[in-house]
Image: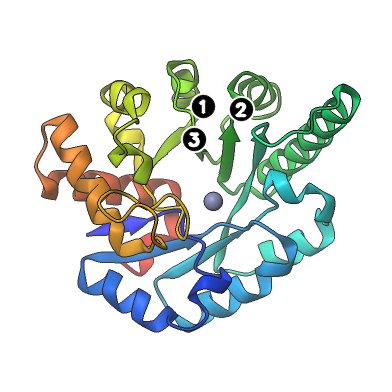
Amino acid sequence: MIIDTHTHLDDQRYLQDLDKVIKRANDGGVKGFLIPGADIEDLQRAREISKKYKNIYYAAGVHPYNVDGYDEAILREFLNDEKCIAVGECGLDYFRLPEDKSEKQEQKAQQKEIFTKHIKLAVELQKPLIVHIRDANEDSKQILLQNYKGEAGGVLHCYNASKHLLDLSELGFYFGIGGVLTFKNAKKLVEILPDIPKDKLLIETDSPYLTPDPYRGRRNEPFYTTFVVQKMSKILGMNLQDIENLTTNNAKMLFKPLKSVI
Ligand SMILES: [Zn+2]
């Protein structure tokens, strides 16, 4: 059994065939799902989906690209819901910053401020934190170390895997491993995977993005976590069943309400 700990099932690209996407996943052994929050406007849809399917949970947060829309009152309202089990995704993403130096600084500062607000919310509400990091390892680590003592733990959902982030596992951080692992140019992630503590590995798709090989280029969906599990099993020299058991147990440790449905 696999739990997809990061799937944007509230995305427009699933509007037409969500039932089929969920069925394909369930039939293929993917039995639990967590929809991270990305934008305030999508939270209502995430809530509706989680009400319809017993094994789908969601989180409330604002992706670093959408920090302008941050609204703490609305996040709090969703975080009161029993199916809303984590804060995020939130974090830093310096991949698309403007060229202009002062604009760049301004956007970085805004991202940092909103990231910190999410962390404080997670600490106050004792919910795990879903962290998005892209091209911002250093700043992200610093902010986490300053503001988070690990309280309810969290997951790092990172594009640029780095040894530098590994010691965050001591703060209770897990590492979300997705389709990037299957890419031919994923050398870094392949290299550090064995160094990630086994009890901190999670499986995710980030669907509809980052589709694994051999379907790279198509819309991603939770069923394709099976390709990530296969690649992980090869790299770690563990059989598929052991990878599934390990990562499913890890997901239940971090996102405890999942225990009651799966
Ligand atoms: Zn995401």
Residue 80 appears in the rendering = no
Q: Earlier in the sequence, mark 1 or mark 3?
A: 3
Q: Position of residue 40 (x, y in %)?
A: 74, 63
> Which element type, helix, strand or loop, lies under badge 2?
loop
Q: Are marks 2 and 1 in contact (CB under 8 Å)?
A: yes
> Tag 2: Cα neighbours inside 10 Å, few (<14), some, or many (≥20)?
few
Instruction: Residue at 49% x, 68% y: name it.
Output: 9
Q: Quadrant of the N terminus?
A: bottom left
> Tag 1: Cα neighbours inside 10 Å, few (<14), some, or many (≥20)?
some
Q: Is residue 155 left or right of residue 261?
A: right
Disc 1 to disc 3, how far (Cα)? 20 Å
Q: Position of residue 101 (x, y in %)?
A: 86, 22
Question: Residue 154 — which label?
Answer: none
> Tag 3: Cα neighbours inside 10 Å, few (<14), some, or many (≥20)?
many
> Which element type, helix, strand or loop, lies under badge 3?
loop
Q: Position of residue 67 (x, y in %)?
A: 78, 48
Q: Is disc 3's CB within 8 Å of ligand 1?
A: no
Q: Amino acid at mark 2?
A: Lys
Relative to 149, say whether 35 is above or below.
below
The residue indicated by pointer 1 is 171
> Which element type, helix, strand or loop, lies under badge 1?
helix
Q: Residue furthest right?
A: 102
Disc 2 to disc 3, how far (Cα)? 23 Å
Could you say which quadrant of the image residue 82 lies in?
Answer: bottom right
The residue indicated by pointer 2 is 149
Q: Amino acid at mark 3?
A: Tyr
Q: Amino acid at mark 1?
A: Leu
Q: Is residue 180 left or right of residue 12?
A: left
Question: Residue 159 — which label?
Answer: 3
Could you say which quadrant of the image residue 243 lies in?
Answer: top left
